[in-house]
Image (spheres, rainbow, N blue to C red):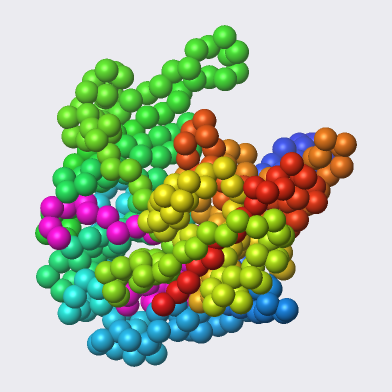
Amino acid sequence: MNSDKGDYDFLEKLKKYIPFICVAVALFALAIGTTVFLIKNLLTKKSFFGTVHSFEVSKEDGVESISAEEISPDEAIENIIGKDIETETAENIDKLFEKRTDYYRGGFNYETLYEHEFNSWQEAYLAYIEHRMKYSMVSEYDYMLIYVDDNDIPELAFVSYGMPPSVILSYNDGKLTEFNTERGGFSYIEKSGLLCNSDGISGAFYDYVYILKDGKWEFIFDGEQYDICDYSETDNPEEIEYLIDNEEVDEQTYDSKFKEVYDYNKRTDFKEQSIDEIISYIKTNKMISADHKYELFIEDCTWEEAAKKCDEKGGYLASMTCDEEFEVVDELIRTEGKQNYCFYIGAKRGGEKPYGYWWIEPGLVQRGLDYSIYENRHWLDGEPSYKSELDDGREIEEDHVEYIHIKSKDKFYMNDIPNDVIAYYPSFRGRMGYICEYSN
């Protein structure tokens, strides 16, 4: 009896741990599978984050459409960079980044110094872009050339707003340095050398401040905040624990010490760009659209008809891929006094990604309108909506884009619309137009 009772007690205890054992086994299997996946992709030089696609603009009866085709990372690199890196061919580019030294820089962040000596910051940044594109998708990031320290060489930022981490490249005395920020979020104060990585998740937040000196990052402020509220006590007010250099302080001390090091109110506004614009600027010191011309036409027509008309004139419906290009078009509309018109522009959706808008301008790699330059500044509030409901209750698809002026804000915005606006909104008759863009 005693033996049987012991076996029974053991089995009863074991039952309590069965769910934990199952979770542990599942996590172990997931870890093994992920490791195998990463190694396989590394060896085959495929993207960790998705398939690389080539977007091709085709024409039928003068109307442009976009199709996506899977291509190799090497082909994607050649499309965007070309093979004009001065020191090495595209096939040998990875060799430039084999010798490296990693340095822990405090918080969750680290710095990588590459041993290869480049001839210029332009050459270093272009080589790095080409190297990185073999392992990640350009659409994961926004891009900026920024001036963190006080010299005339910009830093190149791959900006993320979560995961993967943001990356900031700096160049000093022929060497390239790569700095990674935890969970993406960062700000900087121009020409001060100061960069702040502030972010967090699940009740744990941090403010890590760094200073860039002679191409190297120095950790100068370690601030952390933890939500220690017991949510089982419904009446318990929120309670935050503040730490500086792992020592507990009160909120007032935390705020004052942080501001002594980094005045958040002096941070520089972000001005994100597409990878196409960044590469053009690095190569030529100009944006892609710097020498482009634009023309306004007032005519009641559909979006597809407008696209055909621009094609017949030797151009295409305007595709604004950077803030500077938006500003040029805005000024043109104001100069001609045509703020009361709605203009078709060169963005549409369809194909393999029905819920994403794409510029139709030929030759672009980063075509999507779903990254921060557009989300934060150029889409009308609540847009794109992809659908709209008419006064009679009918729902219509919206799969093209117009550019309109909002009088109350005195600002221009993008708005998605159907192909034939007048067919659904007759009151816009006499108020429609389109903008043609002409490359060199």
Quadrant into which the C terminus falls: bottom left
Q: Residue at x 27, y 39 (%)?
A: 267
> Residue 52 occupies which quadrant of the picture?
bottom right
Q: Is residue 36 above or below residue 225?
A: below
The x, y position of residue 417, in whole percent, is 69, 51
* Residue 21 % position (x, y): 67, 49
Q: Quadrant of the N terminus?
A: top right
Foreground pick, 290 / 312: 312
Q: Is residue 138 above or below residue 405?
A: below
Residue 275, x across and y down, in percent: 42, 66
| Extent of the magenta region | 124-152
The residue that appears at 47% across and 40% down in the rendered structure is: 411
Residue at the (34%, 33%) spot, across then down = 224
Q: Position of residue 131 (x, y in %)?
A: 38, 76
Foreground residue, 348 or 410?
410
Q: Residue at x 45, y 26 (%)?
A: 227
* 177 in magenta: no
Q: Between residues 204 and 93, which one lies in front from this camera angle?
A: 93
Decide if residue 14 is on the left or right side of residue 55. Answer: right
Relative to 265, does residue 429 appear above or below in the rendering? Answer: below
Regarding residue 296, the answer to whether it shows in the image is yes
Q: Along the horizontal axis of the image, is 5 left or right of 188?
A: right
